[in-house]
Structure formats: structure tokens, C-alpha cells
């Protein structure tokens, strides 16, 4: 205690008699963002800081009097309107909460991160889930589904905050702000109970289960999320008009993804880079790629309905989804007026991307008893999904091959 008193007293003498007293600009006295009010956060850590605060408050008050005298002596060079303007300067924190939230809602993610670095109050507002929910949907909503969110919950359960939000000091742009934001250690006044230092809560980063944490994990590529890739392995002819499950990691430098596919039989997991946004979708069903999807649409299938069906080469391979349409039975001439194909237990599935006569051109299933059907030569057909939405159908059709496949 004596050491601290001597040190503070020496600093006061040096400050009072050694430093030239010059008028400071008016903005130096308008410390709304970093005022002495925030010093109360340090009381529990350093009890002696109260003495230093009182002394500095007195000295700054003295400087304020000197400054006001200087302004009086020089008032002839300063108009009344300019003086009023300096007196009435406002900070963004002077705005009502509702107005401030309306402003923050208009900011892009990089703007929110910049504002969050200003002070603890703005940080809490800028990192709130309701502000980042829209950004999350806009940026990642099309490729992040329920399966990915479940994976994220499992992911954060096994991660410690202190080890997760590291590595990013050299990034630029939005990633730079996202990475630099976490180490900013600010004390929350509302979380401190004076006299009990054990109750101090340091908020150096947002909660790992917050939306902004998920956004950052996706944007930096640290979180490999489950999704599905159309025409895997760079559009290999053997996978045309198919969609396979994979784990994806985003590359912000190229604005593309790295895909990691499950092992196929004895083959190791395949890796594909440069996967573009338009080739991705969120998994439509919460199924493992090795599990059979239970079809619930078979009774409703009619000719010309768009469908996707599970298919795999053999029992060791994972399923992929393949695009097709419901066709007419051989005995039906296709006339809509006289067609009764929807009343028959046999359903014809056509894959018109293949040439007529190809063994992949069509297959038939039983409407009432369909499970997994096939053999080692032609592969195994699994569950079926009926495509009811136009956006789902158009997504498949955009990958239609330029030439008919054999």
C-alpha cells in the first residue's frame, strides 16, 4: 500500500509541476465512450485505484477551469454558434436504444464488428443474436440446415472457448475484425459485485453458442459442416445429376468450398476443392448417407412428377440422391385422359439424362412394398422424395448435361 501511495504521489507532483498546462480541445473533455465511470470496474481488482481517480478528477477539474478562462479571454474570436455547437456535441450512445438498434440493423457484418470494438455497451448490442440472425440466414441459410445446426451444437460442446477463437491476427476485412474482436478484454459493470472479486466476469469474446460465433466459425472455415454437393468430383460423368453428402469447409480467399466425401468401400475419403455456392444445398432429410430413407410419397406418385431417389453402387457405399421423373407404364399410351398409371402398384421411374436403351434409363418399383431394390450389377435403389417446390426442381435442371449420357 505504501509503495502504491508513493508512486501515485510522485506521479501527481510530476504531472502538476512538470507538464505544461495547455488548453485541450473540447472533445478531450467529452469522454462519453471511455469516461471515468468505467473506472469502477477496476476497483475490485485494484482497491488503491480509488485514490488515483479522485486525484485525477480534481486535477482535470482544475484544467477545465483554466480552459474555461482561456475560452473567456478569446471569446471575441469565437462566435456564439460555434460555442453552442461544442457544448451540444452528441455521442452515438446518447441515442435512445430503439434508435441505436435501428442503426445497427442496417450495418453489414464488418460494420457490426467495428462498432463492437468501441466499448462494452456497443459490444453487447452488436453481438446480440437478433442482429446476426438475418446475416446468418442471408449468407448461410441456403446451405446450412437442421443437420448442420445439430452438428454445430455437438461441435461446440467439445470445444473450449479459450482454444477455439484463435489464429486470425493476419486476416483482413471482415475476418480480421471478427478475429481481432475476441481478444478485446472489457469489464462488464453489471456483472461486478463490489467487494467480491470472485464475481467479476470478463467478456473477452461472445458466447461460443451465439449466432455470431457460428457465423465466424463458418466464415473462417474452422467448422466443417454437413451439406450436399451436386455433380460431385468436378462434374465427373459418373455423377451427373446426382447429389452426395459431404463435409464442407469455406475458403474465404477463393469464395469456394472444400468438400470431404465419406469413404466408398475400400477407397479413402475423397477430397474436392473449388466447390462453388451454386453446387451446394442443405440436406433435405436428417438421414445418414448410409441409411435408407423411408418414403412417404409413393401412394401419391403420378406420371411427370419430379422425384429424387437414393442410389448406391453396393451395400458398402453411401447413398447419393439422383434426379428423375415418374413415367408411364408400357401399356399406357401417355394420354392423360385415359391414363391409369397412378392406380397401378408398379411405378416407372425415368432418368432421361441417359440415352434410350441404356440400362440406367429407367427402373420400376412397387408402390406398396418398396424398400431397397437392386443388385450388384445395377446398384441399389433406396428411398424416394417427391419434389413439390419449383426451386428444388430448377436447381436440378440447371445441372442438366449438355449431351445425353450413355
Image (cartoon, rainbow, N blue to C red):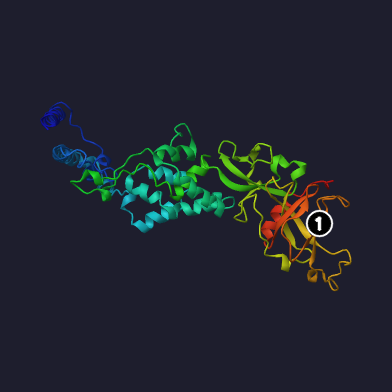
Q: Is residue 145 visible?
A: no
- Identified at 34% across, 44% down, the residue is 203
Nearer to the camera, 91 or 7: 7
Q: In the current view of this chain or complex, which residue is farthest to the bottom? A: 337
Q: Can residue 71 be seen in this view?
A: yes
Q: Mark 1 points at which residue?
A: 363
Q: What element carries label 1?
A: strand
- Identified at 85% across, 50% down, the residue is 359
Nearer to the camera, 88 or 114: 114
Q: Is residue 121 above or below residue 14?
A: below
Q: Position of residue 331 (x, y in %)?
A: 89, 66
Q: Is residue 183 left or right of 347 when viewed as pictured?
A: left
- Identified at 82% across, 71% down, the residue is 340
Q: Residue 48 falls in which quadrant of the image? A: top left
Q: Where is residue 211 in the image (x, y as percent from the top left)?
A: 46, 50
Nearer to the camera, 127 or 25: 127
Q: Where is residue 137 in the image (x, y as percent from the top left)?
A: 53, 53
Amino acid at each position: 500500500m505504501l509503495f502504491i501511495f508513493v508512486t501515485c504521489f510522485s506521479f501527481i507532483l510530476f504531472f502538476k509541476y512538470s507538464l505544461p498546462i495547455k488548453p485541450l480541445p473540447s472533445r478531450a473533455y467529452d469522454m462519453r465512450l471511455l469516461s471515468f465511470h468505467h473506472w469502477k470496474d477496476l476497483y475490485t481488482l485494484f482497491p488503491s485505484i480509488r485514490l488515483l481517480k479522485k486525484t485525477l478528477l480534481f486535477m482535470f477539474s482544475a484544467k477545465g477551469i483554466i480552459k474555461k478562462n482561456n475560452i473567456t479571454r478569446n471569446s471575441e474570436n469565437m462566435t456564439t454558434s460555434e460555442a453552442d455547437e461544442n457544448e451540444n456535441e452528441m455521442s452515438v450512445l446518447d441515442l435512445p436504444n430503439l434508435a441505436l438498434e435501428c442503426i445497427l440493423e442496417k450495418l453489414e457484418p464488418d460494420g457490426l464488428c467495428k462498432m463492437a470494438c468501441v466499448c462494452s455497451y456497443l459490444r453487447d448490442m452488436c453481438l446480440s443474436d437478433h442482429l446476426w440472425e438475418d446475416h446468418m440466414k442471408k449468407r448461410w441459410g441456403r446451405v446450412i440446415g437442421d443437420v448442420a445446426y445439430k452438428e454445430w451444437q455437438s461441435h461446440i460442446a467439445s470445444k473450449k472457448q479459450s482454444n477455439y477463437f484463435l489464429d486470425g491476427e493476419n486476416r483482413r476485412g471482415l475476418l480480421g475484425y471478427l478475429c481481432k474482436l475476441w481478444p478485446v478484454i472489457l469489464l462488464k459493470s453489471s456483472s461486478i459485485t463490489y467487494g467480491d472479486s470472485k464475481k467479476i466476469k470478463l467478456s473477452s469474446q461472445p458466447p461460443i453458442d451465439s449466432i455470431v460465433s457460428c457465423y465466424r466459425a463458418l466464415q473462417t472455415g474452422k467448422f466443417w459442416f454437413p451439406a450436399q454437393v451436386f455433380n460431385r468430383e468436378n462434374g465427373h460423368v459418373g455423377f451427373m445429376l446426382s447429389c452426395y453428402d459431404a463435409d464442407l469447409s469455406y475458403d474465404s480467399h477463393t469464395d469456394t468450398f472444400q468438400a470431404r466425401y465419406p469413404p466408398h468401400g475400400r477407397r479413402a475419403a475423397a477430397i474436392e476443392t473449388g466447390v462453388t455456392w451454386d453446387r451446394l444445398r442443405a440436406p433435405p432429410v436428417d438421414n445418414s448417407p448410409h441409411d435408407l430413407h423411408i418414403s412417404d410419397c409413393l401412394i401419391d406418385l403420378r406420371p411427370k412428377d419430379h422425384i429424387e431417389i437414393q442410389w448406391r453402387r453396393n451395400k458398402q457405399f453411401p447413398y447419393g440422391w439422383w434426379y428423375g421423373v415418374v413415367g408411364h407404364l408400357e401399356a399406357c399410351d401417355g394420354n392423360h385422359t385415359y391414363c391409369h398409371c397412378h392406380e397401378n402398384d408398379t411405378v416407372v421411374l425415368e432418368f432421361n439424362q441417359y440415352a434410350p436403351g441404356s440400362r440406367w434409363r429407367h427402373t420400376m418399383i412397387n408402390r406398396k412394398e418398396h424398400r431397397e431394390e437392386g443388385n450388384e450389377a445395377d446398384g441399389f435403389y433406396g428411398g424416394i422424395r417427391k419434389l413439390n417446390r419449383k426451386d428444388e426442381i430448377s436447381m436440378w435442371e440447371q445441372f442438366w448435361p449438355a449431351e445425353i449420357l450413355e
